[in-house]
Amino acid sequence: MGDLYHWVALSMAPGIGCVLFKRLVEAFGSPAAALKASSKDLSRVEGVGPKVITSLRRYDWKSTAEKELCSLEKIGGRILTWEDDEYPPNLREIYDPPPVLYLLGKVVPQDRRAVAVVGSRYPTTYGKIAAERIAFGLGKLGITVVSGLARGVDSSAHQGALASGGRTIGVLGCGIDFIYPPENRDLFRQVARQGAVISEFPLKTPPDSDHFPIRNRLISGISLGVVVVEATLRSGSLITARFALEQGREVYALPGNVDSARSEGTNRLIKQGAKLVMTAEDIVEEILPHLKEAPPPEPPQPMVSPEEAKVLSVLACDALHIDAIAVRSGWPVARISAILLSLELAGHVKQLPGMRFLKT
Amino acid sequence: MGDLYHWVALSMAPGIGCVLFKRLVEAFGSPAAALKASSKDLSRVEGVGPKVITSLRRYDWKSTAEKELCSLEKIGGRILTWEDDEYPPNLREIYDPPPVLYLLGKVVPQDRRAVAVVGSRYPTTYGKIAAERIAFGLGKLGITVVSGLARGVDSSAHQGALASGGRTIGVLGCGIDFIYPPENRDLFRQVARQGAVISEFPLKTPPDSDHFPIRNRLISGISLGVVVVEATLRSGSLITARFALEQGREVYALPGNVDSARSEGTNRLIKQGAKLVMTAEDIVEEILPHLKEAPPPEPPQPMVSPEEAKVLSVLACDALHIDAIAVRSGWPVARISAILLSLELAGHVKQLPGMRFLKT
């Protein structure tokens, strides 16, 4: 606990963000050593100017950290540092991981397989249902659903994951002692119980609007991919998607009718290269293929028509050029071409280069 | 007209499809010569077996062609052959272009810039409106809209194009003397007047269901790209999309809510790589950039927040690393990162490799 105390103290120091924190620890070996370093030694660290040093000197880190840890204990919260095994491993890989995470509940090894489901705070019914359905599906597939515990899509995503019996992590843009929005009190507690509520902000940090973009990079950072369910063109979810791309995460989006303003952002994402997602399986297929333990069920084999059967019989032995198939079946090439397509779509025939076809 | 007579005669010959027609003309120099060739000479052509020769010998090509041309004249139709300048140039490039096209109306040089708009015969209101809107937009941009004159999306597409004052081509799966479906009588006439109605099928050919896949390859073949508006997973429009890909055409699809069966096919197409389309401009931007004569209007420049202004002022002169921006502005990197993203989205800042940023 002695060491946590210094981690909290340094992370709460004025002017010290994630990157400077990292440099100080690299320079002095530990947060404790950094806090006790002389002004002269501090000034040798890149990015530490007189302003930072002055405010560090004035900073009553002992009492700040004491109070913080005491308050945290009261609400049953914990601190995870970079060095903890429990610290989300995906998050450790981003450019600016927070040195300290405030936590209610717990992070478990399977949370490495996490997917974020985010979107509009004011979704349509379609968006709400889709978020819940996808999160439910992810939960059933053993994926941890990450979201922001905000109104709308976030809430639906957490609810879907909870309903599936799966794990879910809520990442806050305020201290973990704040319940915002207030109507999410029950959801908040369930998420903390069936997963974790996480924040990089100290206790008592209010949910200011400029905290949300900062928080969004954690949502994507904890996850292997981000699904955007509904978003207007000005939605913060698009910022989460951008963070995801910068962090090398997959971006998925739910398509929607082009006359719905809430699908403008998601359709635009797809247009720009995000993967269109319809179901939780779509996501798992693409980024987490090793998670699918059972082989996918065989698609039902549609019956073939008499025409198709004839073409198949022509193809019985060997790959044939389309002209040869036409000649042998006695039908024009255009008709054969249509039959072959239908057979190909049904999986009975495979096209080879040069208009040749093979029975599968 | 004498030559047309032989073209029609050979194209209507039993057992002679597009590919065999082509080989016969290559072998004998013209349809007339092919019709008059001896059985011995005919048998030397690849794909012409005893069966084809027997039926050719029994075929009363003179009276067949005479009757056909006479009937065609009565309905005011014409024939286009491969050799006509009016023959749609895009269509000439496909693997199996029909040697003879039946035509009401006319094909003009600008029809080279054609885009097909196809989809479900039983669309939702959303699909109908989208088809009409996209076709209207294409028409306004000087693109000829190609479709199949069927119920549903096809009809909406033709209507949208007609309403825009643009050109439209209807490709039939029956003879051009058939009006099918019957309720499309007026639409059929308007399309023939403001564009063309085309078929490769002889007169009196009824609209059999197995003609439609054959017809679909012409819809894509005439066009530079195919837009699928709504389609179930079993829709013939997906076959058109497949033809389009085989013919090297672009495939576009309108996204839709994933809980709509009529959007399952289009969403799946997008998932498989088709381009998501929201407006006619999306299509023109991608495949026909030279058609856009006027430059796109400047997007309105959103105002910057005081925070953004500060970051911009830090970036005034030169590209800076994100850490340097953080140090100079006195804000943590995470916050800077969010502000930079917002500036980048608004076009004020450009990200360079290595987390460096430049004012634009």
Image (cartoon, coloured by chain):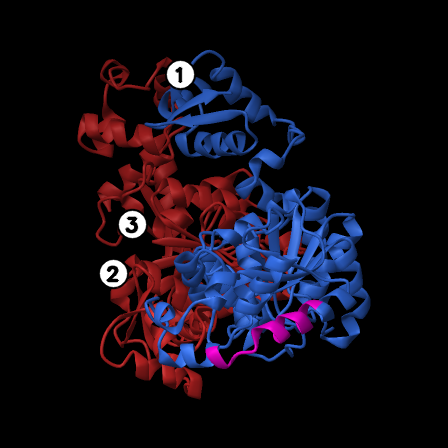
Chain colours: A red, B blue
Tell me, yes or no, whether the two marked residues, 3 and 2, touch with CB atoms within 8 Å: no
Left-right relation of B27 to A121? left
State whether residue A236 is above or below residue B8.
Answer: above
Label 2 vs 1, first from the N-terminus: 1
Q: Type of residue at label 1? A: Lys
- In percent of width and height, residue B52 lies at 42, 77
Q: Type of residue at label 2? A: Pro
Element under label 1? helix
Q: Type of residue at label 3? A: Asn
- In percent of width and height, residue A291 lies at 27, 67
The subunit letter for the residue under badge 1 reads A
Question: Which residue range is magenta in the image?
Answer: B57-69
Q: Nearer the viewer, mark 3 or mark 2?
A: 3
The circle on residue A90 is 3
**Where does label 1 land, which residue?**
A51
Other residues around mark 2 within 10 Å, as few (<14) / some (14–19) / many (≥20): few
Residue at 22% over, 45% down = A83
Q: Which residue ends up furthest to the left in the rendered image? A: A29
Q: Which residue ends up furthest to the right in the rendered image? A: B186
Q: Nearer the viewer, mark 1 or mark 3?
A: 3
**Where does label 2 land, which residue?**
A109
The span from disc 2 to disc 1 (Cα, nearest Å) is: 41 Å
The span from disc 1 to disc 3 (Cα, nearest Å) is: 33 Å
Query: Majority secondary structure of the magenta segment?
Result: helix
Left-right relation of B187 to A358? right
- In percent of width and height, residue B82 lies at 54, 54
Element under label 2? helix
Split into 4 quadrants, where in the image is the N terminus of chain B? bottom right
The circle on residue B211 is none
Q: Quadrant of residue A304?
A: bottom left
Does the magenta portion include B63? yes
